[in-house]
Amino acid sequence: QDIKIALIAGKTGPLEAYAKQTEAGFMMGLEYLTKGSMALNGRKINVIVKDDQLKADLAKTLLEQAYNDDKVDLAVGTTSSAAALAMLPVAEENGKVLIVEPAVADAITGEKWNRFIFRTARNSTQDAYGAAAAVPATGDVTIATLAQDYAFGRDGVAALKSALAAIRPNAKVVFEEYAPQNATDFTASAQRLFDALKDKPGKKIIEIIWAGQHPLPKIADLKPERYGIEIAPGGNILPAMQIYKNYPGMEGAIYYYYAFPKNPMNDWLVAEHQKRYGAPPDFFTAGGFAAASAALTAIEKAGGTDPEKLIQAMEGMSFETPKGTMTFRKEDHQALQVMYHFKVKAEGKDQNDLLDLVDTIPADKLPIPVRNKR
Amino acid sequence: MLPAPALETRGLTVRFGGHVAVNDVSCRFTSGTLTAIVGPNGAGKTTYFNLISGQLRASAGQVLVEGADVTNLAPSARAKRGLGRAFQLTNLFPHLTALENVRLAVQSRAEAGWSFLSIWNSRRDLIEKAEAVLERVRLEDQRNVPPSALSHGDQRKLEVALLIAMEPKVFMFDEPTAGMSVDEMPTVLELIHDIKQRGDATVLLVEHKMDVVRSLADRIVVLHNGTLVADGEPATVIASPVVQEAYLGLEASDG
Amino acid sequence: MSDVAADAANPPLLPRSRTDWLPLILVPVLALAVLPLIGDVSSWVTLTIAGLAMGMMIFLMASGLTLVFGLMDIINFGHGVFISLGAYATLLVLGPLAGWASANSVALNLALLLLCIVVAMVLTGLVGAVFERVIVRPVYGNHLKQILVTMGGLIVTEQAIHAIWGASPIPIPLPETLRGAFVLGDIVMERYRVVAIGIGLLVFAAMQLLLNRTRIGLLIRAGVENPEMVEALGYRIRRLFVSVFVAGSALAGLGGVMWAFYRQTLTAGMGMEVMVLVFIVIIIGGLGSVGGCFVGSVLVALVANYVGFLAPKLALISNILVMALVLIWRPQGLFPVARR
Amino acid sequence: MWLLSSDTPRSLLLSLILIGIVACLFAAPFVFSGSQPLSTAAKICVFVLLVASYDLLLGYTGIVSFAHTMFFGIGGYGIAIALERLGASWESVAIGLVSALALSAVLAAIIGLLSLRVRAIFFSMITLAVASAAAVLASQLSTITGGEDGLSFQLPAELRPAFRPLADPILGVTINGRILAYYLIFVVTVVIFLILLRIVNSPFGRVLQAIRENEFRAEALGYRVVAYRTAASVISALAATVAGALMALWLRYNGPDTTLSFSIMIDILLMVVIGGMGTLYGAIIGATLFVLAQSYLQILMGLGSTALAGIPLLPDLIHPDRWLLWLGALFIVSVYAFPGGIVGHLRRNRSP
Amino acid sequence: MAETSAEPLLKLESVHTHIGPYHILHGLNCEVPAGELTMLLGRNGAGKTTTLRTIMGLWQASSGSIRFDGRNITTLPTPDIARSGIAYVPESMAIFSDLTVRENIVLAARSGPVDTARLDWMLGLFPALKRFWNLPAGNLSGGQKQMLAIARAIAEPRRLLLVDEPTKGLAPVMVRSMIEAFRALKAAGETILLVEQNFHAASQLGDNVIVMEDGLVVHSGTMSDLVADKVLQRRLLGLSLDAHQ
Ligand SMILES: Nc1ncnc2c1ncn2[C@@H]1O[C@H](COP(=O)(O)OP(=O)(O)OP(=O)(O)O)[C@@H](O)[C@H]1O
Ligand SMILES: Nc1ncnc2c1ncn2[C@@H]1O[C@H](COP(=O)(O)OP(=O)(O)OP(=O)(O)O)[C@@H](O)[C@H]1O
Ligand SMILES: [Mg+2]
Ligand SMILES: [Mg+2]
């Protein structure tokens, strides 16, 4: 009997690029881990890919179909956090495992979590701890934040503040600026941020927490360096980070950049991806790969696809990924992973040669709080 | 005290920018009479109708129906008070059939517009009335033809049919016979004559054909540049110099 | 004709309706009114200039739509994709001429921008012609069908962009010398915005001239009301309609280029994203009025900046707020275009 | 005939198609197995209702509104918020539905009274802005609405999959809460559809058509245009609200993309046009065709694209990820091929 | 009809016109001699308007031929027909109501600015147009719109003028101006085909007359013959000249 896995992703719509990466990464992961045989313990692996168009209701319906009609053993998905959240109860109702990748919302492994949910993607809090870890550990640091004015932005800022409190007590957030979700003109925001920071002592940083079209160049063009203010952006997919090139020296944190992790899996992925797609693997390629690895490692360990056995096997399980070894935390099934502190390169070799590694932040230096009610 | 006239205007005035289209027109129309309103093109006849029926807001003055001030009411409310209006430039529901056009007018009269749950096609009362009206204007053969496929003259007849179907107290005809062929005209003129004969209706008629005016009107009101310049018996008014020159364009009375 | 008749029929000529200045004063009045609220003059200048420039870019993106609507009574919901298309057209120039962008020469950089604009306008103009021919022509006079059909065209074109250039966002470099800002004391003016103001004013002036000084505008307005009659007067109205549609599309392309360099990232949906803003602007202006569109754009952009500075919580709805206020004041928009 | 308000399909083929669709929907739980067909059938029912309510506005009254999804969303959120906050009971359903209906009625009346006086196309654009404001609001009020993430909730026990009212299967199908939920949706849809059909064929409905044709003349005949239009908006908004509530009940979830997004508005428009504007039956055909296409087009394209693998370009064009391309083409083609919609087409063929 | 030896300016031969499923013109034959004024009479719905629209190419003749000035114009597109020298005043007047009176006339003068002498003459005929020169034509009164429609057709000299019911809605004094205008145009060598219900006006103007019924020509001849023959009048038009003003 085949092992059936459903991969649900928002393959059409504005995040088409993300979904493509996830799918490519997932398939390459299976290929690598099964050494090209696409079979495990003699059972063929059958992947059913479904497009939820980033719609929560569709994602939910598709997952129901996957469990009921296609009778998959476990499912992986999806791109949008809203869609992923809507999928969570379906896993519980059907009593089957769902590996969430690459949706980031904290609530997935937080308040909306149930025991069938595992996540290989990083969550927003991990990003926040990464960002906090990239802030100097000593001296006066004054921080202002710029985020979108909706739940994701506000949660992001809150997470950053608690992360700073936890690991960088020397840094203070003095100002929070929220811009409309679809804002295009940031002059007013920038003015307010500059006004808030310019007279402060020590290192002055604007942390940008943003989903979608990045305001970085708009802020940078208004010359924050006049006041000695630095900007710290988060990581992003490669095409989006190409803008960073114009601002060498800028520092921030990221969870995957193809040149950073040193392990055979990543080496293979980078080489193979370059060969097949003419570009290095990106953010979500690594994510997809990790999800594949989690699934196969679990099935192998559980000796089959029985959901209860899978859950038992996966709780606390470590598995190898291009991002390095990851571990599903027992309490909330969130996979923990390393983060990287980067600095933007002055002169890259090519358009994707963007970042220099400043520091690797090991997973145990990131005390991500457990937020689910178990 | 005399009973209030069916329709009265007091100092009715409207200005468009610098142009005074209707200038301080006061006039009473008693029921049972047919008043012809004549005047050169652009004299303000249609505008006067628009002010009475509410399509235009007056700059000054009042419109009274049976003594009640309706100046601030919407056209629909005035129609409910019994002011009925046919238009100079044909103005119908182009894609509904002739019968449905008339039926809408009948229905408005029957106050059935807010009935949500009865079935329109089984309202025999409305249909029969509408068919009767179509027969009166001799359009019964065209009952299923939409106005967009009617010739100009037939559209004019339908326009009149709508007005009749509304059964108003005040009938306002704006050149009902324009574009109607000579052999069709008697039908419409007879209709207007019948309405007048009934005695309880007030008819206002704008018409450029003097023979029509002569044969129908009890009274003639002359508008000129928006001002009321003559009012009285048909014969006297027609003979007055202002009508002879400004309207008929005759040097002396040779018409 | 007798004397009486002649006299009566010869009252003085009525004057033409006068230009309506009130909406034009609105912008400077608003700008001055917020000065005391902002307090700091340099912040005010920075915000005002940035707002003006943003207004120009919005105007460039919206002008084509309002032109096509105002002249032809066609509501093109696919307008947004022409903006995207214009933006992507820059790639055709930036590919071979990448050197011009990184060159540290104002002349070369501006020439590059100009070239991008020309290429984009040609491309969107051509696609516009196809659009008009294949999609829009059969539905003249029917707004609903126009909305549907152009929406279909939008989806198809957007997918074509995906198919040709891929789904990932594409970063594009702003030419070297247009980057950064002029700094005068505490006032900053982004260089690119200064360029945008220039181009916006130029296009506005050109449109005004063309529409008011030639008979093209007349002919098209007449043709929309009654194409049969215009043909019966001996004009080949079809051709003109195509040209207007092409012009509208080309303007969208121009707007797209300006927007692309502003955002520095291309996505197929970038045009669609600004459409609600564009619609708001042309409603404020009075559907179909180019002048109104201009004032509306500047108004919306300035208010967005001021509100964003003074009360960022309200920034989210500032556009809709402006629209509501304008509509309460003038229910048909600032410069209503009479029709029907 | 009385049930259909004497507005029969007036074409044999059309009657057969309609009977076929209704029969399939009625028998769906028993004829098709699996959760996908049932989901599809439920979605068809909801959209039939939604599209019919929109047709009242668009086809019969000639109002082009882009805010229709707002009412759909209010219905969905009404149910979602009530069930999430007040617990999974029938009282919560009632409270949610009633408050949603009240809110919709008030909003529709306000929008109608304030803005139905302006030019038609102007009104459309204003509703566009209103709709986008509603979406922003839903996202901002995240503590109540769940923001971008939406709300997942539990249904009353009788509608849960685990509920088994009958011990024995009927026709080989075990009746469970899911099937009950489906029939709830089906029955509500049928009843409201018939009410809408009655309304458009009532004297009131004819006044709406008259207003669409020539509002100036309707006013002169004594009909208060603004009042009639507002009434039509309110009725249509109420029906859309019910549709939203049904949608939420079926999905046990509601979020901005599910009921508020602009793309749903576009879908509705397309369904109305494919089916045939101004013929409520068009709503049935349009919604059925469209939902089927939406559910199965990608699958079909996937099959086609693998079958054609090897041939240049073609497999790319019918790659499942390009389904939107075909949807767009469908927009264009449907407007041309069926100017009167499918219903108009079928009726015309009958009477030369 | 006058047995002119030369070919008539306009000639319709067994023209059939369909509008959608309706068959309106059933093989129309008629001619309009150059330099003369020909009246087209008939009851409501006889097909007069349809005839004019078919000539202008606004409706396509389904069979038959229309020759203008020796050229077959049956299938030409409307703008080309207009450019060959035909002006048209439609029954609905088709005023451009958004445009000012001036703009309406500017558009009608295809070949450039209107000749000032001609403009003065026109505005003398229709003084109201002068007064509303710069205001939107949509605001004109019914009769004023009719005047504008005529003015538009005569803004420049044309070979042939097709006019559909020009006196409808005009005050008697204006009907006189109108008659004057057509006389003047005829004197200037223009050919006119006039549809008219006002037989009184028609009788003063026409050289020739064509009477239609149900999409066919039932009579054609000179106006003087018809004016003289009371019986014929009654048979064709249902009324005699005397009974009507
Ligand atoms: N909205 C408006 N703006 C400016 N002027 C107007 C407007 N409406 C009407 N007028 C002018 O007011 C005058 C009166 O017009 P009205 O239509 O009442 O004339 P009328 O007496 O009905 O003429 P006719 O016999 O030609 O129909 C006309 O000169 C017209 O141009
Ligand atoms: N658009 C149309 N569609 C269908 N039938 C039409 C259309 N227009 C006119 N007809 C029909 O064609 C016939 C001739 O109409 P036409 O308008 O040519 O008559 P007419 O002689 O000009 O009449 P009138 O004197 O009333 O203007 C009429 O029976 C009319 O119903
Ligand atoms: Mg008049
Ligand atoms: Mg006619």
Image: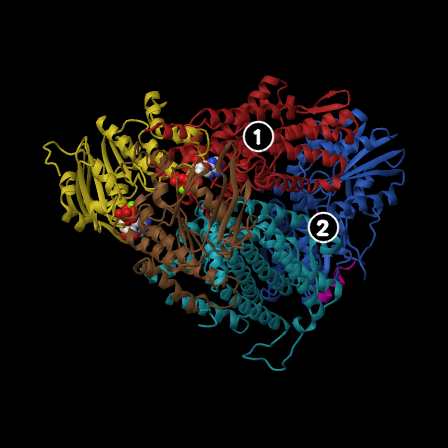
Chain colours: A blue, B brown, C red, D cyan, E yellow
Which residue type carries mark 2? Ala
Mark number for residue A121? 2
Helix, strand or loop at mark 1: loop
Q: Which residue is mark 1?
A: C20
Give the chain letter at badge 2: A
Q: Quadrant of residue E21?
A: bottom left
Helix, strand or loop at mark 2: loop
Magenta span includes A318: yes
For residue A365, side relative to residue A76 (left or right): right
Magenta residue span: A307-321
Q: CA distance from mark 2 to mark 1?
A: 59 Å
Tell me if residue E111 comes above or below residue D324 in the rendering: above
Which residue type carries mark 1? Asp
What's the residue at 82%, 54% (across, down)? A370
How far across and how far down the image is residue C113, in percent?
A: 57, 24
Tell me if residue E210 comes above or below residue C233 in the rendering: below
Q: Is residue A82 visible?
A: yes
Magenta span includes A152: no
How far across and how far down the image is residue C63, in percent?
A: 54, 33
